[in-house]
Structures are given as C-alpha cells and as structure tokens.
C-alpha cells in the first residue's frame, strides 16, 4: 500500500462521524485490524481496498492518495475554474468589504505576476514562484483550518509539529532558487543542469499602467500596503 492510505482511511471515517467499532463491523473486520490499517501498522488487501471505496463512496485512487479530488479526477488546466469568469459569483460580501478588497488586490496582482512569468519563458522560474505561492496559501489555509480543534487533522499528511518549520524552509528554498534563476545562476538550483540566461523584464510604473490598465493600481496598492506593514513592524521593534 502507501503512506497516504492509513491517513485517508481514518479521515473518511471521522468525516462520516462513525466510530472505529461501527466502521469495522460494517466493513466485516475486527476493530483491532481496522485500527492497524488506520495507523499503517498493517497493509490491507485489494478486496478490502475496494470494500472501503464502496463504503465511503470514493474511488480507490482517492483512498491511495493518487488523486486529491474525492471524485478521483486528475486535475487538468481545462478542469480549473476561470477566476475571472467566477469572480462575479464569488465576490459576495458576506464578510464585509475587507476580504473582497484584499482578494481583488491579490488576485489582480497575481494576474500581472504570472503574465510577466509567461513573458520570461523560464519554466524553472515559473515552478519556483508558483511553489512559493502555493506554500504560502497552504500555510495560511492550514492555520485557519486548525483554528477549530474539531476539524479532522487527517486532511494533512504533514504533522502539525513539523508543518510550520518544513514549509517555512521550503518557501525560503523556493525564493533562493527563484533569485538564482533570475540572476542567471540557475546552476545553483539542483533541478537545473545549466545556469541559463538571466531573466530581464524592464518595468516601471508607466509600463505597468500601459500594459495592465485594469490591474496595475491593485499591484501598486499591494506593494504600498506590504511595505507599510513592514515599516510599521520595524518601528515597533
């Protein structure tokens, strides 16, 4: 089997709100054996895997961690909703103006960032920047998710004690790799065989406004807000 199966098996049972005793009875095995499966002490057979998939109404690929989607689907570009098309539907002011405002600032700024990355035509740089941002979102989502102790922690493979340190280290590595690639020192990045050329994208506020008339003000405001946050923090210390 694999390391994801025990975690997902336990997560599905807890999300369903049933005890280990009840689940083991329904699945036709002893509670002790189910406990061993959920802890990864023992590996189950194919027949039990299929039985679990039917019991929890999920595909085997999800149980095995091969798909992050409960439908078992493998995500493609076509499957991802277009945020611009969905913006009108999701920009509901349930929480007031602040979350909507900040979401727009970040979303519009990311539009510019990823357009610039596309113009740079450097896959390694796109990978490192994207990984950094994904890790940042992961970190903040996990913080919010764990605010309620009742939420099932099995959603995450990384234990809480390791998550913050490991994610922080990986974000620093992504930033260092991106910097090396931008400076044409890609040979410092383990995944790259050759340094490659430095990435050069001449920019100024006028260029940003001309090329991104809908988004430039959001980016400039995000820069100001971010630096104000840093400056205020520095004054406090």
Image: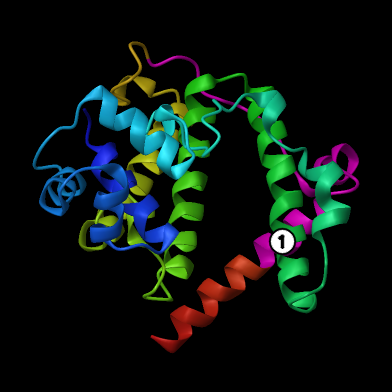
Residue 64 shows in the view: no
How many discs appear? 1
Label 1 belongs to which residue? Answer: 103
Q: Is residue 89 above or below residue 8?
A: below
Which residue is pictured at 23% across the width and 59% down the height? 21
Which residue is pictured at 9% across the width and 42% down the height? 41
Q: Position of residue 216 (x, y in %)?
A: 81, 50
**Part of the protein shown in magenta:** 195-224
- On-image quarter of the N terminus: top left
Q: Position of residue 76 (x, y in %)?
A: 62, 24
Element assignment for label 1: helix
What colouring method underlies this structural image?
Answer: rainbow
Of all residues, the one furthest to the bottom in this rendering is: 236
Q: Position of residue 196 (x, y in %)?
A: 45, 14
Q: Is residue 68 above or below residue 79?
A: below
Which residue is pictured at 39% across the width and 74% down the height? 150
Residue 208 figure quarter = top right
Residue 215 shows in the view: yes
Is 5 displayed left or right of 62 in the figure? left
Is 106 displayed left or right of 229 in the figure? right
Categorize mark 1 by other alpha carbons within 10 Å: few (<14), some (14-19), many (20+): few
Which residue is pictured at 51% across the width and 39% down the height? 70
Of all residues, the one furthest to the top in this rendering is: 193
Residue 65 part of the magenta-drawn span? no
Is 110 displayed left or right of 100 in the figure? left
Residue 189 figure quarter = top left
Q: Is residue 146 above or below residue 25?
A: below
Residue 192 figure quarter = top left
Residue 198 part of the magenta-drawn span? yes
């Amino acid at each position: 089997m694999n390391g994801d199966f025990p975690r997902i098996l336990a997560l599905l049972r807890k999300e369903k709100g049933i005890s280990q005793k009840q689940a083991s009875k329904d699945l036709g095995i002893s509670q002790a054996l189910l406990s061993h499966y959920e802890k990864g002490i023992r590996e189950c057979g194919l027949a039990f895997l299929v039985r679990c998939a039917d019991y929890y109404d999920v595909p085997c690929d999800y149980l095995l961690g091969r798909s992050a989607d409960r439908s078992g689907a493998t995500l493609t570009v076509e499957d991802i909703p277009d945020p611009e098309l969905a913006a009108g539907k999701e920009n509901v002011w349930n929480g007031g103006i602040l979350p909507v405002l900040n979401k727009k600032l970040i979303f519009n700024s990311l539009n510019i960032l990823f357009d610039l990355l596309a113009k740079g035509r450097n896959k390694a740089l796109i990978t490192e920047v994207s990984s950094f941002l994904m890790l940042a979102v992961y970190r903040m989502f996990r913080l919010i998710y764990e605010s309620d102790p009742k939420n099932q922690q099995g959603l995450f493979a990384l234990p809480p004690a390791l998550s913050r340190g490991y994610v922080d280290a990986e974000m620093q590595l992504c930033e260092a790799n991106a910097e090396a690639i931008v400076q044409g020192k890609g040979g410092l990045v383990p995944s790259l065989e050759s340094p490659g050329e430095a990435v050069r994208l001449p920019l100024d506020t006028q260029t940003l406004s001309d090329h991104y008339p809908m988004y430039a003000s959001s980016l400039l405001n995000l820069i100001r807000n971010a630096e104000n946050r840093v400056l205020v923090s520095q004054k406090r210390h």
